[in-house]
Image (tube, grey):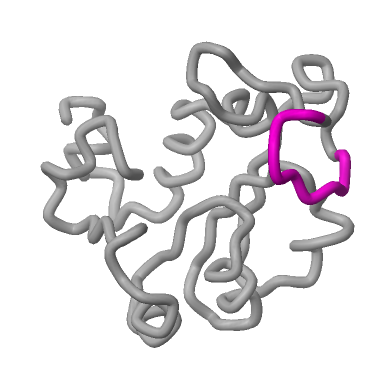
Amino acid sequence: LLEQGWENEVRVHRKSGKWTIRQSLAFLEQADMVIGPETGVLNAAAYLDVPKIITLSHSSVENLTRDWKNCISLFPDTKDVPCYSCHRLHYSFEHCWKDEVTGTAMCQSKISADMMWEVLLNYLPDENSVYRSGTK
């Protein structure tokens, strides 16, 4: 959520890289929703009631998010990324497929904005929302 116009949405508080880990964790129970990749912040929110959307990369639902409360896991189609889920921590691209367009891991780049939007629609307040109608 660091890019693509979210800075214009007043309901989205983009704090990645700006807050300390303590500030981030203290905010978790106050947030309306937590969205992000499989990081320590999302792991810390696992059993909180706050809705979570996580984009999985090296982990699978079975080994990470299966028992999390109020969580939706997004992951790539294995037809697009046969190495998913590799269950490895990567510190370089030596053993990871890199998407050259985005510069990120292939498994993350194949989780599309459309996939995220489809899930987010489930959390919007009502059917009359301008976001649901596609006018925003």
- Identified at 83% across, 24% down, the residue is 78
The boundaries of the magenta stretch are: 86-94
Q: Main secondary structure of the magenta part?
A: loop
Quadrant assignment for the C terminus = top left
Q: Position of residue 133 (x, y in %)?
A: 24, 30
- 69 to 53, vertically: above or below: below
Figure quadrant of residue 4: top left
- 52 to 46, vertically: above or below: above
- Identified at 75% across, 62% down, the residue is 65
Q: Position of residue 5 (x, y in %)?
A: 20, 34
Q: Is residue 124 visible?
A: yes
- 24 to 6, vertically: above or below: below
Q: Position of residue 32 (x, y in %)?
A: 35, 70
- 26 to 134, vertically: above or below: below
Q: Position of residue 7 (x, y in %)?
A: 16, 44
Nearest the camera: 110 or 103? Answer: 103
Task: Examine the structure image and report whether residue 53 is included in the region drawn in magenta.
Answer: no
- Identified at 67% across, 24% down, the residue is 106
Nearest the camera: 41 or 113? Answer: 41
